[in-house]
Amino acid sequence: MAVSEEVRKAFADYIMLQAFDDQYIDRQEEKNILQEGVTKGIGVEEGLAIMRQVAQEKGLALERDAEERAKEMLERFATNDGKVDKKEFVDAIAIFKSASKGKIPEHEMKKRLKTMMETNGWKAKEGGLFGSKWYSAI
C-alpha cells in the first residue's frame, strides 16, 4: 500500500521534530519514530527509508548508521590480516564519533566496538614486547 504524500510529509516533520534539539537520533528515538510511523500506516522498512532520507537531507545523525559504518571499518581491518590493531581500532572510533556527531561517550563507543568484534569473531592485536593490553583494558 502506497503512503500518501501528505502522510510522508507529516512523518518527515515528526522525524525532524524528534531530532530538533541535538540533530541526532539514537536507537530509542528511532524505535519511537518508527512506532509513530506504523500508527500512521507506514511500514517499518518504509519508515526507516524515510528516516534515512530525512537524515541525509537535513544532516541528522542516526545511531544505527554510525554503528554500521564503524562495523564496516572493523570488518575491513579484520579481513586485512585477521586482526584489528590499536591504531585501526582508534580509527574506527574516530569514524563512529564523527558519524554520531560526538553524541556517544568515548568509553561507550569502545565497549560497543569491542562487543561487535567479539560477536563477529574478530581478534585484537595487542601485547608484544613493548605492546600494551589496550583491548583487554576496555
Image (cartoon, grey):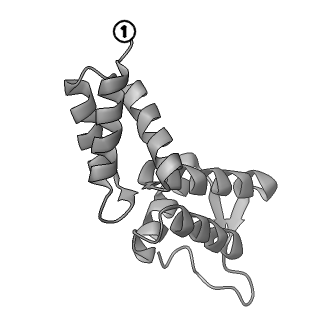
The foreground one among 87 and 98 is 98
Q: Which residue lies furthest to the top in this view?
A: 1
Question: Is 16 positioned to the left or the right of 77 in the image?
Answer: left
Q: Quadrant of residue 94?
A: bottom right
Question: Is 69 positioned to the left or the right of 58 in the image?
Answer: right
The residue lying at 22 percent from left, 34 percent from top is: 36
Mark 1: secondary structure: loop
Q: Where is residue 14 in the image (x, y as percent from the top left)?
A: 27, 43
Three-letter code for the amino acid on which mark 1 is drawn: Met
The foreground one among 20 and 130 is 20
The foreground one among 53 and 102 is 53
The residue lying at 37 percent from left, 31 percent from top is: 47
Q: In which quarter of the image is residue 3?
A: top left
Residue 63 appears in view? yes
Q: Where is residue 86 in the image (x, y as percent from the top left)?
A: 66, 75
Q: Is residue 73 above or below residue 22?
A: above
Q: Residue furthest bottom?
A: 130
Would you call the spot at circle 1 few (<14 residues within 10 Å), some (14-19), or many (20 or more)?
A: few
Image quadrant occupied by the N terminus: top left
Question: Is 39 positioned to the left or the right of 9 in the image?
Answer: left
Residue 119 appears in view? no
The residue lying at 59 percent from left, 50 percent from top is: 121
The residue lying at 57 percent from left, 80 percent from top is: 134
Q: Which residue lies furthest to the left in this view?
A: 39
Q: Where is residue 48 in the image (x, y as percent from the top left)?
A: 41, 34
Q: Residue furthest right?
A: 81
Q: Is residue 71 above or below residue 51?
A: below
The foreground one among 55 and 69 is 55
Q: Number of marks in the image?
A: 1
In the picture of the structure, the residue carrying the numbered disc 1 is 1
